[in-house]
Amino acid sequence: MPQIFHRSTNTLAKLSIFGGLFILGFAAWALAEINRSSWNTGAYVEREQPVQFSHKHHVGDDGIDCRYCHTSVETSSSAGLPPTKTCMNCHSQIYSDSPYLEPVRRSWKENKPIEWTRVHDLPDYVYFNHSIHVNKGVGCTTCHGRVDEMPLVYQAKSLQMEWCLECHREPERFLRDPKEVFNMKWREENKTEGELAYGREWKQQSNVRHKAILQSCSTCHR
């Protein structure tokens, strides 16, 4: 019986199969990268605010502690936003006539809160408690980055589930003495064996829950 297909057909068939697998693999990789990109997560995008409050100036230059404005961060699930009165504690005397701060003065006179644009906005199906993390030894910079170096605040991390699980699987990489939680210059991650031993020590002292509980769906999705 004469040969119907040329011998090169076998080669073309193999190339088509491998090419198809390569295209599928590349498409999966591309989708994963897009999913992690700032275009999707909103990371590294500076947000415009009604008043362009500079954390770099207030925290980095003036040394104002996070808790002065975010008063409930140690006791509540929410870190809290400062009322206008907190701003006016200083600005009733400092730069009190600056046109730049007119929205603050108007808010104070009209007794209407400033409508800040939220930077770190988790989905409604995610439960996150600031006080638990702070009291266990998770630093502000671990999640929010070096806010003391940000003229305009941006989301420094992806806030995706894989990022949360990175800490929940190995909390010793990120824990510190709770007294250092608000130290902006503290290292972001424990990497050396000595630093990891330090993290394991605070994991034990802070009574951090077992990994199985930390990785349980119901821990964050309630």
Image (cartoon, helix red, strand yellow):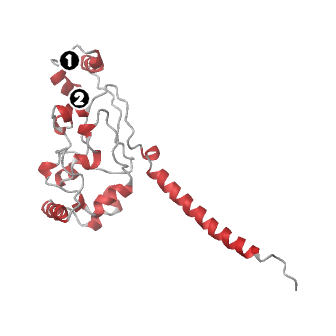
Residue reaching furthest top?
Answer: 97
SS state under label 1: loop
At 17% across and 19% down in the image, what residue appears?
Answer: 94
Tell which of 190 and 218 is nearer to you.
190
Q: Position of residue 46 (x, y in %)?
A: 37, 35
Query: Which quadrant of the view contains residue 14?
Result: bottom right
Residue reaching furthest bottom?
Answer: 1
Q: Are marks 2 and 1 in contact (CB under 8 Å)?
A: no
Split into 4 quadrants, where in the image is the N terminus? bottom right
Identify residue for label 1: 95
SS state under label 2: loop
Identify residue for label 2: 83
Where 177 sits versus 192, above or below? above
Q: Nearer the viewer, mark 2 or mark 1?
A: 1
Tag 1: amino acid? Tyr
For marks 2 and 1, the one nearer the N-term is: 2
Q: Position of residue 152 (x, y in %)?
A: 32, 33
Residue reaching furthest front?
Answer: 8
Q: Position of residue 186 (x, y in %)?
A: 18, 49
At 38% across and 55% down in the image, what residue appears?
Answer: 161
Where 35 sits versus 113, above or below? below
Do we see residue 92 in this rendering?
Answer: yes
At 16% across and 65% down in the image, what residue appears?
Answer: 197
